[in-house]
Image (cartoon, rainbow, N blue to C red):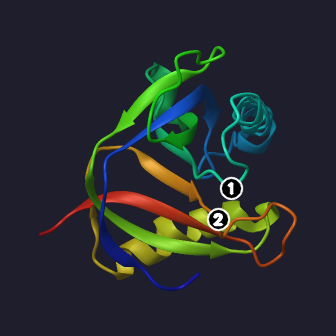
Amino acid sequence: MSKISVVEMPARTIIGKSADFYGAMSPKFNGQEVLGPVWGLVNAKRAELGLPADSTMIGATQPASSAEAENGLLNQFVGIVVDEVPADLMGLEVMHLEAGLYATTEHVGGMETLVNSIQSFYSDLLPVYGCTQRSGLHLEIYDDRFDMSSPDSIMTIAAPVQRV
C-alpha cells in the first residue's frame, strides 16, 4: 500500500448488521474480536438470501454515538451491496451510502496485516497527500478481488475527503 487515489464513490445500498468496537488507532483495539463474528453472520445471511458468493461487502465505519467515541469507540455497519432490498431481510438492516468524494488506497495481503495498512493510511499517507478529511463514513470495500484465503488478496480502504 503506498498510493492514494481520490475518486467519486457512487451511492449504494447495503444490508447487514452493525457493532461497536475500539478502532485500530485506540489502545483498547478489539476490532478483530468484535467484528469477526458480525462479518461471519452477515456472510452467512448472504448465502441464506441466495446472493452471489462474490457480492461486494462493505464495512462502513463512523464514531460511535456515545461518550466512549473520545476513546476510539467506533461503529461499523457490515453490509452486502444490493441493487434491490430483499422483501425478507432475515434480521438484517438497511443502510444507504451517499455518493461522495473519497481518498482510497488498496490493501494487498491477508487480514492479519489489515490493521497496519489502515493505521498507515490514516497516519502517514493521508497527511502526505494533503487530503482534508470530511465527516462521513469510512469504508472498507471487499469486492471480487478479495479472497480471505489468499495472501495476495486486495481490498480498498476509503476515507471521505473534500477538495481544498
Mark 2, Cα crowd under 10 Å, few <14 / some 14-19 / many 20+, is: some
- Horizontal side, residue 45 vs residue 73: left or right: right
Q: Quadrant of the C terminus?
A: bottom left
Residue pushed farthest bottom?
A: 2
Q: Which residue is mark 2?
A: 144
In front of the other: 77 or 43: 43
Question: Which picture quadrant has residue 148?
Answer: bottom right
Give the residue type at disc 1.
Asp
Q: Which residue lies under the disc numbered 1? A: 54
Q: x, y percentage for residue 161?
A: 27, 60
Q: How many marks?
A: 2
Q: Nearer the viewer, residue 12 or 102?
A: 12
Judged from the image, the secondary structure of the residue bearing numbered disc 2 is loop
Residue 130 found in image quarter:
bottom left
- Above/below status of 105 relative to 112: below
The numbered mark at residue 142 is none
Residue 17 x/y as whole percent: 60, 26
- Give me the residue at 54% from left, 38% from top: 72
Left or right, residue 84 beside residue 27: left
